[in-house]
């Protein structure tokens, strides 16, 4: 059993009950792990929730763009580069 098994099961329960906001909150913890992403993707698609899957993936992209910005800030600060 993977460490994200519980998050995946909670996400599936939320999808089954059409609680997509809650499913997205759980899904954001799962999306970052490629092994779990395929199962999550298939679960949404098998039930016809394509728009909800896209919304989840877009939210994950937004999350990673923020993380990427902070990583850039740390790198530029530690290397002495001026970002602006």
Image (spheres, rainbow, N blue to C red):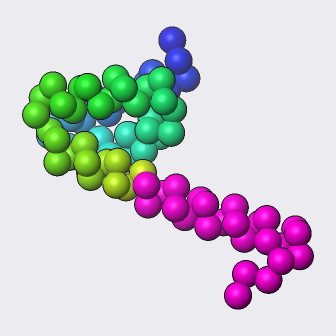
- Is residue 68 magenta-colored? yes
Q: Quadrant of the C terminus?
A: bottom right
Q: Where is residue 40? Give x, y as percent.
A: 33, 29
**Which residue is pictured at 51% across the width and 12% down the height?**
1
Q: Quadrant of residue 31?
A: top left
Lateral position of residue 30 relative to residue 44, left or right:
right
Q: Where is residue 41? Give x, y as percent.
A: 29, 31
Total marks drawn? Answer: 0
Q: Nearer the viewer, residue 14 or 58?
A: 58
Q: Taken as a whole, is the magenta stretch helix, strand or loop?
A: helix
Give, as a single range, the part of the protein colored magenta.
61-84
Query: Is any atom of residue 22 visible in this view?
Result: no
Query: Is any atom of residue 77 visible in this view?
Result: yes
Lateral position of residue 13 relative to residue 28, left or right:
left
Asked if residue 42 is positioned above or below residue 27 in the image, the reply reads above
Asked if residue 15 is positioned above or below residue 2 in the image, the reply reads below
Asked if residue 66 is positioned above or below residue 25 in the image, the reply reads below
Asked if residue 15 is positioned above or below residue 80 in the image, the reply reads above
- Is residue 7 magenta-colored? no
Q: Where is residue 32? Give x, y as percent.
A: 50, 39
**Which residue is pictured at 42% across the width and 51% down the height?**
60
């Amino acid at each position: 059993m993977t460490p994200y098994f519980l998050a995946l099961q909670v996400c599936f329960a939320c999808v089954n009950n059409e609680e997509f906001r809650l499913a997205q909150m759980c899904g954001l913890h799962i999306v970052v792990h490629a092994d779990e992403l395929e199962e999550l993707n298939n679960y949404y698609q098998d039930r016809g929730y394509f728009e909800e899957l896209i919304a989840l993936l877009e939210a994950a992209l937004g999350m990673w763009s923020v993380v990427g910005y902070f990583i850039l800030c740390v790198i530029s600060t530690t290397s002495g580069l001026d970002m602006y």
